[in-house]
Image (cartoon, helix red, strand yellow):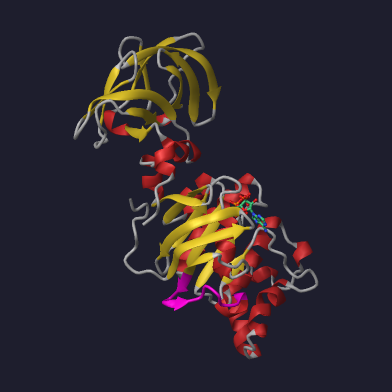
């Protein structure tokens, strides 16, 4: 089964890239094609192999087996400094004794660019990240977000074919981080640089990227656009790592094009096809897809056990015959339901997904 919807034109390509540290397999047979101008994020929990993958593309880590191609050139064994890639890592160490302008200019000096051209390029790069006014400051005189933008300008100024970002926003507070996410995306769109970013923050990956590579245990388990990853997660762990999901255990009573699932106390129809009669499955439904109604008016009833005010939404925990369900309801001005309230719960059929209960079978799927 091919886990990646491949772009038509590959610019950066990873073919069966594998990395062993001693006997530890950090990355296993990774296949990825990135189109020119695309923004792709590697997303996954700590230790899943994101940074190692990026480091192999950068040339800072060797590849145990497999190959990496850039614009049709095999760069698997090319030295890092000959790849010409733009890199912004978590520790984006700026030179403390150099001004912002000199920090950004450094890479151009190394490339022996004439001074006049250099200062013009530095000016343009600083304008791109809105830091023209701070060109003569030193890093210690900047905020975290401003330093992050200098690091970005420094990487972009060399006009790299590919920009590699490893948790580039991780040192920022939540509000600044959100602002920088949109800023980063805007800059990337404007410049059109092919970008690969590592993050463990699912909302960051979803909001910035054209496509997301979900990684688990060294393997890419789903590669798709953010909407599809969220709405059609391939595995149980993706459904809970990328957003939240209620997972209900059941078995298929009618298979084929129309699937009907017995969840114990109720039977429900699901749009997902291809499951056979008798298969043990998990029905996944996102909390925001569940709707609270009057008791007796939904698919099942439940008692509100807890409620939390989140500002724009209410988060309810509801005890039902199928177990505890999380329900996210918009704060639309109507009074919230009290704890102890008996409510009906409903959901649109097209908002549920069926996942095989046997995850072991899925995890072993080899990417094509
Ligand atoms: N230099 C190394 N030597 C030995 N093992 C390593 C080395 N670097 C990484 N590993 C191991 O390889 C696996 C993948 O690590 P990697 O840093 O790529 O994960 P990650 O997804 O980027 O995690 P995080 O989000 O925590 O940075 C982990 O099990 C890690 O312990």
From the top left corner, tell me how far across and down residue 308 is, in percent. Answer: 55, 23
Residue furthest right in the image: 97
Q: Nearer the viewer, residue 219 or 121?
A: 219
Which range is magenta?
Answer: 68-80
Across the whole image, how many numbered discs are drawn on residues? 0
Magenta segment: does it hold 70? yes
Residue furthest bottom in the image: 114
Q: Is residue 171 visible?
A: yes
From the top left corner, tell me how far across and down residue 14 is, in percent. Answer: 45, 65
Quarter residue 144 falls in = bottom right
Q: Is residue 66 above or below residue 356?
A: below
Residue furthest left in the image: 257
Magenta segment: does it hold 280? no
From the top left corner, tell me how far across and down residue 32 is, in percent. Answer: 43, 61
Q: Is residue 127 visible?
A: no
Q: Nearer the viewer, residue 101 or 43?
A: 43
Q: Quadrant of the C terminus?
A: bottom left
Q: Nearer the viewer, residue 313 or 356?
A: 356
| Residue at 68% across, 63% down | 92
| Residue at 52% across, 72% down | 76
Q: Is residue 295 above or below residue 184?
A: above
| Residue at 45% across, 41% down | 238
Q: Is residue 340 above or below residue 141?
A: above
């Amino acid at each position: 089964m091919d886990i990646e919807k491949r772009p038509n034109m590959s610019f950066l390509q990873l073919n069966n890239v594998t990395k062993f540290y001693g006997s530890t397999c950090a990355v296993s047979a990774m296949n990825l094609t990135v189109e020119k101008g695309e923004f792709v994020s590697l997303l996954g929990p700590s230790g899943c192999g994101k940074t190692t993958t990026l480091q192999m593309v950068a040339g800072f880590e060797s590849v145990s087996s497999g190959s990496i191609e850039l614009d049709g050139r095999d760069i698997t064994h090319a030295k890092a400094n000959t790849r010409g890639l733009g890199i912004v890592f978590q520790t984006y160490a700026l030179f403390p004794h150099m001004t912002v302008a000199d920090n950004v200019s450094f890479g151009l000096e190394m490339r022996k660019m004439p001074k006049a051209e250099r200062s013009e390029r530095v000016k343009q790069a600083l304008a791109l990240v809105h830091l023209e006014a701070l060109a003569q400051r030193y890093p210690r005189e900047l905020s975290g977000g401003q330093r992050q933008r200098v690091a970005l300008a420094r990487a972009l100024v060399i006009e790299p074919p590919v920009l590699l970002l490893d948790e580039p926003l991780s040192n920022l507070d939540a509000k600044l981080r959100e602002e920088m996410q949109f800023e980063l995306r805007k800059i990337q769109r404007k410049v059109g640089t092919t970008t690969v970013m590592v993050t463990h923050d699912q909302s960051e990956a979803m909001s910035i990227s054209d496509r997301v590579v979900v990684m688990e245990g060294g393997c890419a388990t789903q590669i798709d656009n953010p909407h599809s990853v969220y709405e059609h997660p391939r595995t149980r762990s993706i459904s809970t790592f990328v957003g939240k999901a209620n997972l209900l255990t059941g078995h298929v009573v009618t298979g084929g094009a129309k699937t009907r699932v017995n969840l114990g106390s109720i039977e429900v129809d699901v749009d997902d096809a291809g499951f056979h009669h008798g298969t043990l499955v998990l029905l996944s439904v996102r909390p925001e897809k569940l709707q609270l109604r009057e008791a007796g008016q939904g698919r099942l009833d439940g008692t509100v056990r807890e409620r939390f005010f989140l500002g724009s939404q209410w988060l309810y925990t509801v005890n039902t015959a199928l177990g505890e369900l999380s329900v996210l309801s918009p704060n639309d001005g109507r009074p919230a339901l009290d704890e102890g309230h008996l409510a009906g719960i409903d959901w649109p059929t097209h908002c549920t997904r069926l996942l095989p209960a046997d995850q072991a079978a899925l995890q072993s799927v080899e990417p094509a």
